[in-house]
Amino acid sequence: MKRLVILGSGESGVGTALLGKQKGFDVFVSDKGSISEKYKKVLLKHNIIFEENKHTEAEIFNADVVMKSPGIPDKVPLIQALISKKIKVVSEIEFAVKYTNAKIVGITGSNGKTTTTLLTGHLLKKAGLNVGIGGNIGDSFAQLVAEQNYDEYVLELSSFQLDGIIDFSPHIAVVTNISPDHLDRYDYNFDNYINSKFRITKNQTATDFLIYDADDIEIQNWLKKNTTKAQKIPFSIEKELEYGAFLRDDKIIIKLETEEVLIKIDDLALKGKHNIKNAMTAAITAKLLQINTDGIAKSLSSFEAVEHRLEYVQKVNGVQFINDSKATNVNAVFYALDSMKSPTIWIVGGVDKGNDYTELLSLVKEKVKVIICLGIDNQKIIETFGNLVDVVIETKTADKAVEVASQMASSGDAVLLSPACASFDLFENYQDRGVKFKEAIKNL
């Protein structure tokens, strides 16, 4: 019996444990921290041996294969020791893909990948396909493979997940956009991060497809310098294309084998320039999987917004509160601020990942009247924007941030939580931050 050791007991770790157990591995889960009760119950129910608050090397170094949770960097000593001992270290998606023959749509990018994943899954489900949706959102790919028998998977894939692939290859790969993010993980080298994203296409063949943003400079630069065997399909909101998706007269046009008018922008359920691109991406994918145009248009008009992504929560005394907690990098905040039509009180801050805020300067000057910092270390934000707005206030809880925002706002203003940072200084994750923000609004 082969031994599978899993480092990390989060969604991907426990999902891999379930799949490994099902496939006859001797499974051992090791977590340097504590294991949450939710996941501990799953492991106990399936008689999977685990340890927490430590890594016992004697139990780990006898593995045939190690699945490393995406949050663990390659540079940590334990991973380096495994590599030096020539023990195979893979990501969850690499482990799971061996056990399914389904078509895979893999979606990555700095921003928009969650919305695009859910929107694509929505289109495919509405068309009657037997599709599983997961990866970096919802259930892990490994758990879906273990518990279901889907014909297609639509997977959100982070750069951390892609770092651990060897043979994984999606039939349709999507790169939504690329902007600086997680640079602390990539030695503050943007090229390292870009190359990590494009690992999504490294094993694709001439029968596969790569869908990408033709307006994105970093994507264009990478494609000029590197090759992919996949068939490339671009999309753009800035120019008409000979092939792919583009805008004409406020309509999305899809031009693959023939040219088709897909949908009017005004009929899209999701608003904003970034969501036009998300819709284009999902529509191209649906067309490649033989879904008819009318069905795609209907599904694009019926999709509901993603929680924590430009989520219009509630109006209080004429002030619109917007939850964009998922905006954990500068580019995501750029889209959010760009979409604001009202004077904005901006709640920002958290764990900085090497942010360069300069691209936000003109938007902040134009649209933001008050900045409320929600983080432990706000110095960089204050230094960057302190001269652009009249008021900058520091807070340490969602309740306080919302209370101060409500006091500073006038009827007709918007209060936007769009942090540009990770949440781990004050919250469990971006979802926890968003939930606490919404709870605070209800308590006003």
Image (cartoon, rainbow, N blue to C red):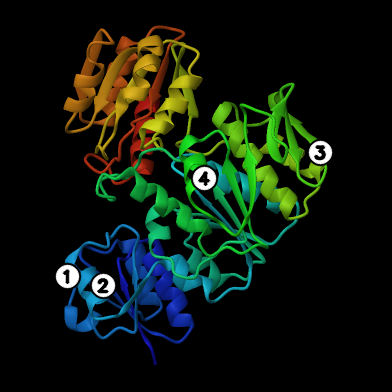
| Count of picture labels | 4
Percent position of residue 28, x then y = 31, 79
Instruction: Tell me which numbered mark, 3 or 1, is placed earlier along the sequence.
Output: 1
User: Residue 391's x, y, as percent?
Assistant: 24, 11
Which residue is under mark 1?
A: 54
- Dot placed on the residue nearer the N-terminal end, 3 or 4: 4
Q: Nearer the viewer, mark 3 or mark 1?
A: 3
According to the image, label 2 marks what residue?
30
* Residue 259 numbered mark, or none: 3
**Which secondary structure lies at badge 4?**
helix
Q: Is residue 319 above or below residue 424?
A: above
Residue type (three-letter) at the residue carrying disc 1: Lys
Query: Which structural element holds mark 3?
Result: strand
Is there CB contact under 8 Å for labels 4 and 2? Answer: no
Frontmost of labels 4 and 1 is 4
Q: In the rendered structure, are the residues bearing label 3 and label 2 in contact, judged by CB atoms less than 8 Å apart?
A: no
| Residue 20: quadrant of the picture | bottom left
Residue located beneath label 4 in the image: 224
Q: Residue at x 23, y 11 (%)?
A: 387
